[in-house]
Image (cartoon, grey):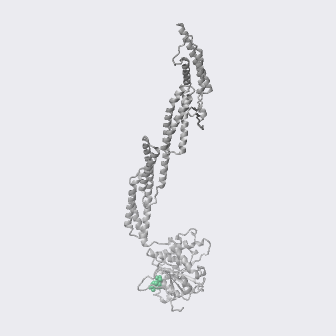
Amino acid sequence: MSSKELLPRLHLIDDEKRFSNELSTYISDKWDLKDAGFNYNLAAIFGSQSTGKSTLLNRLFGTNFDVMNETARMQTTKGIWISQGKDMKALIMDVEGTDGRERGEDQDFERKSALFSVATSEVLIVNMWEHQVGLYNGANMGLLKTVFEVNLQLFGGNLDFGFFYEKTLLLFVIRDHVGSTPLANLSNTLKADLERIWQGLSKPEGLEDCKISDYFDFMFTTLPHKLLQPEQFEVETQKLRNRFVDSKDPNYVFQPQYSKRVPADGLHVYAGAIWEKIMTNKDLDLPTQQELLAQFRCEEIANAAFVVFKDQIKEFRHPIEAGHLVEGLGPKMKEARDVATKSFDKDASRYLPAVYQRKRTEMLTKANSMLESYFVGQLKNLHKKAVSNFTTQLQQALKVEGTEFGKAAAKTKQEAVDFFLKGAKAIKLTETDWEYEEELYQFENDLEELTTVQREKELAKMLTGLEKLIKKELDEPVKLALDQPGPGMWGRIMTTYRRTSEDAELLLKKKAKTFELKEEEEEQLTVNLKRQSWVLLTMKVQEESVDGLILYKLLNRFEEKFQRDSHGLPRVWSPTDDIDTPFRKAREETIELIPLYAKINTLDPVTDIHLALESSDDFDFDQSLQVLSETRQQELTTQFKRKADASYVEAKRSVVATQAK
Ligand code: GDP
Ligand code: MG
């Protein structure tokens, strides 16, 4: 390469923050470093804009980075340029700085570029004017702080794992050195500043105690004013150059410990990956001025809209919490939300669309979550109200004679569900994920339960009614039959029972239809009813068989036979009459009735079959047939005999009395 020829340079990271994909081509073709392995160096420069960085690099390394035009004073191309040093196995990066005063896009780029330089270079030249020393902003110390901090965060962690961390050399070049302040003083000031910066860093976990010297070495030098002392400037620049090219120079900078140990042919991958990591780390992003403004204003506008919104919706809270249904709640909530978004849109839509949209969504979410508690509350109240409507309406309907339970329940339920759904749909706002399905499900369950309870009640009522009917149908015929004891007595009672229970069954079947009973339910009820009829029957029998009554029945029967003639007329005994024979006959016949009373005979004379019911835990059929126990039969016999004997004596006496007249 001839010395006249311009050294090829590459726009490594362009003004759009894109990493060049030509680095590997440049390394192999233009700079002939493909096979250099570790045998090459990488340096970069860092500093404020227009501090003569590019000028210095071109002087030191024979590069041809753009130098700011003296007359036009336009800023040179943004980004990072990379070039090979003339006749050197060194790559030099020229990083375009800013004046660091303006926030926003430029600063974001600046800190990322600086971070990239620190992370990749062995030597970072920190370029500054002498008068910047000791000035925080002017000397880019603020930026250095950020770069240290993020560098530690992103790449400092490997200290933890005990790896060898490649230090970076920070070479401070103090420009336009007048000479009145010796280098030693300047460097002390800088060192103290750096130490202070390091103390103030927020360090990642585990690295709280790390020292600046774990990561960086420092070197300080000065250069005279290029225009005012051109010769000295030339001499000093050459001396400085020697530090980069002469490994025997005591201040030689490319010491092996600074090498990042990346072979030249892999540099493009390594550097690209570091840039990628820097670019994808959101913590590093600095919002642009426009973003900051949009965030601030949209936030303010949203807050103002929200105050109005909250004021508008607060009136719903009380009634809902008190369990009332707020009339027209859905449209009212929507109205409040619309007013808020409209007022937000009016002012906020003028700002950066991405920020405006994000804030709008945030506000909508916040509004929705406030409204959701009203939605949920109103749903609960709707549920309660619909349940109570259901109960009263069903009861109302059942009061009407002839109402069929099944039909009435279904109709009332449908009405309640419609009421709930109508209310629920009316309060579900668009652009929400609110749901009422769960509440509906619970509500329907409640209706189901209430229906079951109500049905049980109605069924019980119906059965009680049936039993009353049965009792009415049984009582009279049973009493009559028992009053007329004789061979056909039980037969008559059995016939009555069969007829009654058949009637009852028919009636039950008819009623059961209105309850929409299942077949097995109906069967069970029929069995129960049959048994209940039987129990009613036996109860009547027992009632008619209490001590006095049965004795009375027996005596009636006896008197009929003994004291009445064949025409049923009262007998008047004459002295010639045989009293003893009819007395004995009547007494015998009556005593024979006692065992007849004692046990129900289940033979039905019409069907000629014995009636039988199945016994269960609380019902013993055989037991139910017993009317009089052995002992009671004996007692009855004795009691009866005593009364009968008295009748006999009475009859005898009446004869004697007639004779005496
Ligand atoms: P950069 O933006 O830091 O790269 O600065 P440039 O290298 O583009 O130089 C900016 C201006 O400073 C140019 O007009 C240079 O001529 C001028 N300049 C370069 N070196 C020096 C120097 O040592 N002292 C002074 N005072 N001006 C310099
Ligand atoms: Mg420059």
Residue 528 visible (yes or no): yes
Indicate whether 205 appears above or below 12: above
- 311 or 117, nearer to the observer: 311
Q: Is residue 455 above or below residue 566?
A: below
Percent of width and height locating residue 372: 44, 57
Outermost residue toward the top in this view: 661
Quarter of the image holding residue 289?
bottom left
Front residue of 16/50: it is 16
Q: Position of residue 230 (x, y in %)?
A: 48, 89
- Viewer-side residue, 449 vs 265: 449
Does residue 218 appear anywhere in the picture?
no
Q: Which residue occupies 48% across, 76% down?
A: 109
Please say if 445 is above or below 148: above
> At which x and y percent is residue 531?
55, 36
> Disc count in the image?
0
Q: Residue at x 57, y 12 (%)?
A: 577
309, above or below 259, in the image: above
